[in-house]
Image (cartoon, rainbow, N blue to C red):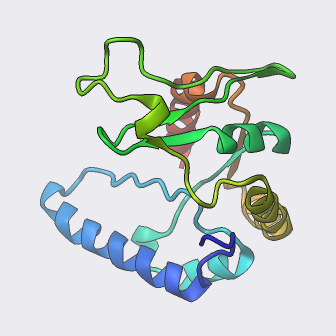
Amino acid sequence: MRSGALVDDALVNDAVIQSLENRACAKMKTAGKKNVVILDGFPRNVLQSSLLEKWPDSLRPSLAIQFDVPDDICITKLLGRRKCSICNGSFNVNGVDTGGFDMPAIVPEAGVCKVNCNPDVDWEKRDDDTADTIQLRMGIYHKETKPLLKYWGERGQLLRFVPFKGVKDMDKLVSRVQVLMSLK
């Protein structure tokens, strides 16, 4: 991972299906309720998508969501990720205000942190959040995702979403997903 390489497809598939099967067994007690699971970053390529054909029907994804954000904005936000070693909070020190995108930095308001973390000392940047590693990951993403978007699009199961306001737009996304899922 530190080199920017992605984990083996079969290994990821096995881990995801095992986790979903465990979750499905645990949810059997709530029969009649729909299980909703978001798989962030999976399937990531056509090979992983083809592995879905072997999954039980009840566990197969019914919708893929593409967050349609320009590379320069993704890179800026990725370079701003921070994790607090004291409170385990996740933050982003980089804001974006360009091209219709308005994604402010995500930091705690003064006095809100209960353990009084010091961003200059306690916030850590991931080792793999470097410009070179992010550029490598973005290249892999584009190469492997273009056919994947086609795969899901041809099946009528692709939702393209542009989060102009970042996390503030998640309610809009949830509403769109709920509408689409009610039609299935």
Residue 17, position in %: x, y? 41, 77
Question: Is 24 left or right of 184, judged from the image as shown?
Answer: left
Which residue is at 51% across, 80% downward?
Answer: 13
Residue closer to the observer: 62 or 122: 122
Which residue is at 52% across, 41% downward?
Answer: 82
Question: Is 142 left or right of 58, judged from the image as shown?
Answer: right
Question: Is 60 left or right of 84, judged from the image as shown?
Answer: right
Residue closer to the observer: 176 or 134: 134
Location of residue 90 by image quarter: top left
Which residue is at 74% across, 42% downward?
Answer: 74
- Residue at the front extreme? 121
Q: Is residue 24 visible?
A: yes
Question: Is 121 left or right of 40, judged from the image as shown?
Answer: left
Q: Is residue 68 visible?
A: no
Residue 143, position in %: x, y? 85, 68
* Up/down of 96 relative to 87, above or below: above
Location of residue 86 by image quarter: top left
Location of residue 100 by image quarter: top right
Residue 155, position in %: x, y? 72, 62
Residue 50, position in %: x, y? 65, 81
- Residue at the top extreme? 110
Quadrant into which the N terminus falls: bottom right
Which residue is at 76% across, 67% downward?
Answer: 148
